[in-house]
Amino acid sequence: MGTKELLDKILSDARERVQAIEAETAGQVKAIEGRGQEIEAKLKAENEVRIRNRVDAILENARSRGQLEAQKIILSAKWRLITKVAKQVKQSILKSPEYGKILKLLIQKYADSNAKIHLSPADTENFGPQLKVRLGEPVPISGGLIIRSLKEDVDLSLDSILNQVLEETITQLATMLFD
C-alpha cells in the first residue's frame, strides 16, 4: 500500500470516526435537551403548585382578617348600643320622681351617723336639704352619692353602680339585645 492509499485510509477512518463521534454527541445532546425539558416542566409544575398554594394562603388570610374585622365592627356596634342603653337607664333614674327616695334609702342603708354624704352639684342643690344629713363638698359624679366616714369610703355613685350591674349582667343583656 502506498503513502497515498495509506493517507486516504487514515482520512477515511478519521472521517468515519468523526461521524461516529458527531452522531454520539448529537444523541447525547438530544438526551440532555430531553432531560432539560423534563426538569423544566417539573420545575414549572412545582412552581405553579407553590404559587397556587401561596395565593390560596393569602386569600384565606385575607378572608380571615375580613371576618375578624367584621366581627370587630359588629361587637363595637353592640357595645355602643349597650352603652347607649346604660346612658338611657342612668337618665331615667336621674329623672325619676323616686330618685330622691333612692338617695335616702342608700344613706339609711350604708351611712353611719358620723359619715359625710357627697352628692353631685345638681343633687346637692336639688336634694341636699331634704336628706337631713351631714353633707360634704359636691363631687364630680353624675348622680348617686359617695359616703365618707372614718372607717371607709363607699362609692354609691350612679356610674359606679351601673358599671357594676353592667359587668354582672353583660352576658344576659347581650343575649337579650342580640339573640
Image: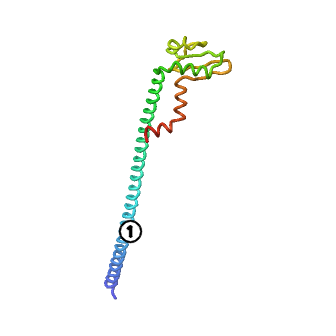
Q: Is residue 128 above or below residue 175?
A: above
Furthest residue toward bottom: 1
**Which quarter of the figure is the C terminus placed in?**
top left
Furthest residue toward right: 151
Residue at the image position 47 percent from the left and 38 percent from the top: 174
Task: State the scheme by which the image is colored.
Answer: rainbow
Q: Which residue is mark 1?
A: 35
Toward the viewer: 79 or 91? 91
Q: Is residue 43 above or below residue 129?
A: below
Answer with left or right where residue 93 lies relative to residue 133. left
Which secondary structure lies at badge 1?
A: helix
Query: Amino acid type of disc 1?
Result: Arg
Residue at the image position 40 percent from the left and 44 percent from the top: 66
Mark 1: give few (<14), some (14-19) or many (20+) Cα within 10 Å: few
Residue at the image position 55 percent from the left and 11 percent from the top: 129
**Residue 24: x, y in percent?**
36, 76
Toward the viewer: 15 or 175? 175
**Which quarter of the figure is the N terminus placed in?**
bottom left
**Residue 154: x, y in percent?**
61, 22
Toward the viewer: 38 or 91? 91
Q: How many marks?
A: 1
**Residue 51: x, y in percent?**
39, 55
Answer with left or right where residue 128 lies relative to residue 85. right
Q: Is residue 169 above or below residue 67?
A: above
Asked where in the image residue 18 lies, by quadrant, the reply is bottom left
**Residue 169: x, y in percent?**
52, 35
